[in-house]
Image (spheres, grey):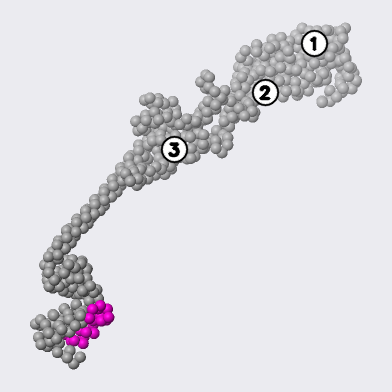
């Protein structure tokens, strides 16, 4: 408080005030501005509240003299509102007489309640105004229109004097409301110091940016809820009659599409599939097709593009940054709860255009996601994406199927050849067995015609082949005999008990008799009796002594013919 006001505080009368209104102009008049000649009713001032005459007491007195100047009601009683109104009038006049006006930036707040019940608040700050006042026009003793250097107008008024909505296109309306009765004793400097738009005495009751800022604040609060995907589905642009579930799905569908429209690249999913071909016996032949994940640059992104019979969610031009997929037109389908239908898939394959499907429901597996997180998931997450079609992948699948079919056919042909070869072997075997039976029957029939001497001669012939270790045992007519077969075939003339098994073995008597016979032939090698007898089987195993006598008789009979046997005499 300045020294002048401090001096006024001493001995201040309860019913006085330092301000009044000029009776002719309604201009506020400060007691300190009057002269001695304006003392009393000569001041020509009234109370702006009750319009009663005022007296100027001690007008023109120096505040330091101890005689405090002030205004007081002449006849009427001063009411509590008189001091408020006179202070407000003074503040209005002093504000109008300023050379510069400063209007702080407007602030508007808004709150949006999300579908979860969580409030989202936003504040928007407008532009501060600092301009020179170039013109002033009093509309009434309670209102003044200030024209600024920019040509815009500001209305200043006392409280309760005008509805704000009636002022049309003015820049701002400043309402003055003094709530301190002591202001009626303040000096002009003190009132000017208090007359700032800080909300103490003056406030901006209307600003032309109010509606715009309120709308922006509301939009920002709603956008903050939208960033968390917590917006009320009912507030979304939906078809009439949509259920809450449909609304929520549409919100998520919109959010993903909005994310795609703002991206310039996405991570494609890996593609892995097996082409299969099955043989009749159930053996499976597979050829794997694998396309690794890669980043795809996207451009010319648009939605709501109509194709022949269907409307994809997103259409763009894609280019694989690595790999062989190249540059291609790309459709992106957003699946919330319903995936691409078979009919739509057939049309996509008909047009042979690349298509990726995003399974939106997989985004929420880790909990609620924000719009920014959703944008990152749309760009980077490959678990939520799947290739529905791509021209080059389709050709790879066709080639893989051809390879699988070829492998199946080659395997089937190989197996059929093996089966044919097996059938041929079986047939040949059966033919051999049939021929063997015929040959065996033929041998049996021939052997049955032999008499005993001939049968014994043929037996020696067969045995000699056997003893010689030849692969086949043949008779004189070239017939091949199995082991013991000839003996069984000639059993009608040579009894089984006549020739024991030990007699016919490699070291049996029969072979030794054969050696004796061969030794009698011209040019035959020497044959020693001792060696001949020592190589025979144990005589006990021969089973019949007559064979030994036969051997000695053969030796005695052939000795005179074959000198080789003469050495046996000494033995």
In magenta stretch: residue 347: no
* Magenta part of the chain: 527-545
- Residue located 84% across and 12% down the image: 79
Counting labels gives 3
Q: Which label number is shown at residue 49? A: 1
Q: Residues within 10 Å of mark 1 (few under 14, many from 20)?
A: some
- Residue located 14% across and 62% down the image: 445
Would residue 65 be found to the left or right of residue 88 on screen?
Answer: right
Q: Residues within 10 Å of mark 3 (few under 14, many from 20)?
A: some
Q: Nearer the viewer, mark 3 or mark 1?
A: 3
Q: Secondary structure at mark 1?
A: loop
> At which x and y percent is residue 292?
42, 44
Kindly check if marks 2 and 1 are in contact, taking CB atoms under 8 A apart as contact. no
Q: Earlier in the sequence, mark 3 or mark 1?
A: 1
- Residue located 82% across and 26% down the image: 1
Would you name the residue on which mark 2 appears? 102
């Amino acid at each position: 408080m300045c020294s002048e006001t401090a001096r006024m505080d001493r001995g201040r009368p309860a019913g006085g005030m330092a301000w009044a209104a000029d009776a002719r102009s309604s201009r506020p008049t400060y007691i300190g501005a009057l002269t001695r000649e304006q003392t009393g009713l000569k001041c020509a001032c009234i109370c702006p509240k009750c319009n009663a005459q005022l007296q100027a007491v001690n007008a023109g007195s120096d505040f330091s003299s101890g005689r405090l100047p002030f205004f007081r009601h002449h006849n009427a009683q001063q009411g509590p509102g008189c001091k408020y109104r006179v202070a407000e009038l003074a503040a209005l006049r002093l504000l109008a007489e300023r050379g510069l006006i400063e209007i702080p930036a407007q602030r508007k707040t808004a709150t949006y309640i999300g579908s979860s019940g969580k409030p989202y608040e936003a504040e928007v700050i407008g532009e501060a105004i600092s301009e020179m006042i170039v013109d002033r026009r009093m509309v009434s003793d309670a209102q003044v229109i200030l024209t600024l250097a920019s040509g815009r107008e500001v209305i200043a008024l006392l409280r309760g004097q005008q509805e704000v909505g009636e002022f049309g296109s003015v820049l701002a309306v400043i309402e003055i409301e003094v709530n301190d009765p002591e202001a009626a004793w303040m000096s002009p400097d003190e009132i000017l110091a208090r007359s700032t738009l800080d909300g103490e005495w003056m406030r901006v009751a209307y600003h032309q940016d109010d509606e715009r800022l309120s709308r922006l604040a509301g939009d920002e609060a709603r956008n903050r809820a939208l960033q968390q995907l917590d917006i009320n589905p009912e507030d979304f642009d939906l078809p009439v009659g949509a259920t809450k579930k449909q609304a929520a799905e549409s919100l998520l569908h919109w959010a993903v599409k909005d994310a795609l429209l703002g991206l310039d690249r996405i991570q494609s999913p890996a593609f892995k599939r097996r082409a299969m071909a099955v043989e009749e016996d159930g053996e499976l032949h597979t050829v794997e097709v694998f396309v690794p994940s890669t980043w795809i640059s996207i451009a010319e992104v648009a939605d709501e593009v109509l194709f022949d019979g269907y409307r994809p969610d997103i259409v763009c031009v894609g280019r694989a940054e690595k790999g062989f997929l190249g540059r291609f037109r790309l459709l992106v389908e957003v699946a919330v709860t319903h995936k691409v239908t078979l009919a739509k898939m057939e049309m996509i394959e008909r047009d042979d255009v690349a298509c990726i499907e995003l399974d939106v429901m997989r985004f929420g597996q880790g909990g609620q996601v924000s719009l920014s997180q959703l944008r990152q998931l749309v760009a980077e997450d490959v678990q939520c994406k799947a290739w529905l079609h791509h021209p080059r992948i389709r050709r790879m699948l066709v080639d893989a199927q051809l390879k699988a079919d070829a492998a199946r056919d080659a395997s089937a042909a190989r197996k059929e050849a093996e089966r044919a070869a097996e059938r041929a072997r079986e047939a040949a075997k059966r033919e051999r067995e049939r021929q063997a039976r015929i040959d065996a029957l033929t041998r049996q029939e021939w052997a049955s015609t032999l008499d005993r001497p001939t049968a014994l001669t043929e037996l020696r012939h067969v045995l000699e082949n056997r003893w010689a270790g030849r692969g086949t045992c043949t008779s004189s007519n070239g017939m091949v005999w199995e082991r013991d077969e000839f003996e069984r075939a000639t059993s009608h003339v040579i009894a089984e008990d006549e020739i024991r098994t030990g007699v016919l073995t490699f070291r049996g008597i029969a072979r030794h008799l054969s050696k004796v016979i061969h030794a009698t032939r011209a040019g035959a090698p020497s044959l020693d009796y001792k060696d001949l007898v020592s190589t025979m089987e144990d005589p006990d195993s021969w089973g019949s002594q007559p064979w030994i006598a036969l051997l000695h008789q053969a030796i005695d009979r052939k000795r005179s013919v074959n000198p080789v046997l003469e050495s046996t005499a000494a033995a």
